[in-house]
Image (cartoon, grey):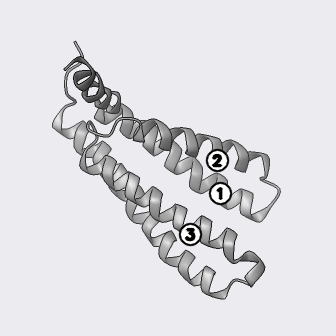
């Protein structure tokens, strides 16, 4: 039987997600200044990127607050961050690729570790319970 994680593991996993949320929120705030200085032909892509930081910050905050009540959020974040890391690793010869490889590697690995520590897969029990009702 799959039991709840120990309090220590749960807090460690939640803490990792809180750190990711806070760091990503800071990147979002920085992105607003990048948007303010962007040329009109770059504004859309910089806006899309900046708003994405806010969405990811919110998703990590949700995972920190309710790690076993967020079905699919864990898996979507992990998929996106692993995919972004793989892409960044193919672009290590560029400045942006190098920065993204470091940042996305951290958030991918820390999210996977938190998923294990918090037993994030248990959030699917909510979906199964509602389907059975």
Give the residue drawn at x 52%, y 50%: 106
Q: Are marks 1 and 2 in contact (CB under 8 Å)?
A: yes
Mark 2 lies on a secondary structure that is helix
Q: Is residue 27 left or right of residue 83?
A: left
Q: Is residue 29 above or below residue 61?
A: below
Say the numbered circle drawn on residue 100.
Answer: 1
Give the residue drawn at x 45%, y 44%: 110
Mark 3 lies on a secondary structure that is helix
Q: Residue furthest right?
A: 93
Per the model, the C-alpha gap separating discs 1 and 2 is 8 Å
Q: Is residue 126 left or right of residue 7?
A: right
Q: Is residue 75 left or right of residue 71?
A: right
x and y percent of residue 65 in the render? Answer: 25, 50
Question: Which of disc 1 and disc 3 is earlier in sequence?
Answer: 3
x and y percent of residue 104 in the render? Answer: 58, 51
Q: Is residue 6 above or below residue 59?
A: above
Say the numbered circle drawn on residue 68.
Answer: none
Classed neighbour count for the residue bearing mark 2: other residues with Cα under 10 Å, few (<14), some (14–19), many (≥20)? some
Say the numbered circle drawn on residue 50.
Answer: 3
Question: Which of disc 3 and disc 2 is earlier in sequence?
Answer: 3
Q: Viewer-nearest of labels 2 and 3?
A: 3
Say the numbered circle drawn on residue 84.
Answer: 2
Mark 1 lies on a secondary structure that is helix
Classed neighbour count for the residue bearing mark 1: other residues with Cα under 10 Å, few (<14), some (14–19), many (≥20)? many
Quadrant location of the N terminus in the rendered image = top left
Q: Viewer-nearest of labels 1 and 2?
A: 2
Quadrant location of the C terminus in the rendered image = top left
Q: Are marks 2 and 3 in contact (CB under 8 Å)?
A: no
């Amino acid at each position: 039987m799959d039991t709840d994680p120990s309090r220590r593991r749960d807090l460690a996993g939640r803490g990792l997600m809180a750190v990711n949320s806070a760091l990503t929120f800071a990147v979002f705030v920085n992105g607003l200044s990048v948007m303010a200085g962007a040329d009109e032909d770059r504004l859309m892509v910089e806006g899309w990127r900046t708003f994405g930081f806010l969405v990811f910050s919110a998703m990590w905050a949700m995972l920190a607050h309710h790690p076993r009540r967020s079905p699919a959020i864990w898996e979507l974040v992990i998929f996106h961050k692993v995919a972004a890391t793989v892409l960044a690793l193919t672009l290590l010869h560029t400045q942006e690729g190098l920065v993204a490889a470091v940042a996305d590697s951290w958030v991918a690995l820390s999210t996977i570790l938190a998923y294990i520590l918090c037993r994030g897969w248990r959030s699917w029990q909510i979906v199964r319970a509602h389907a059975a009702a």
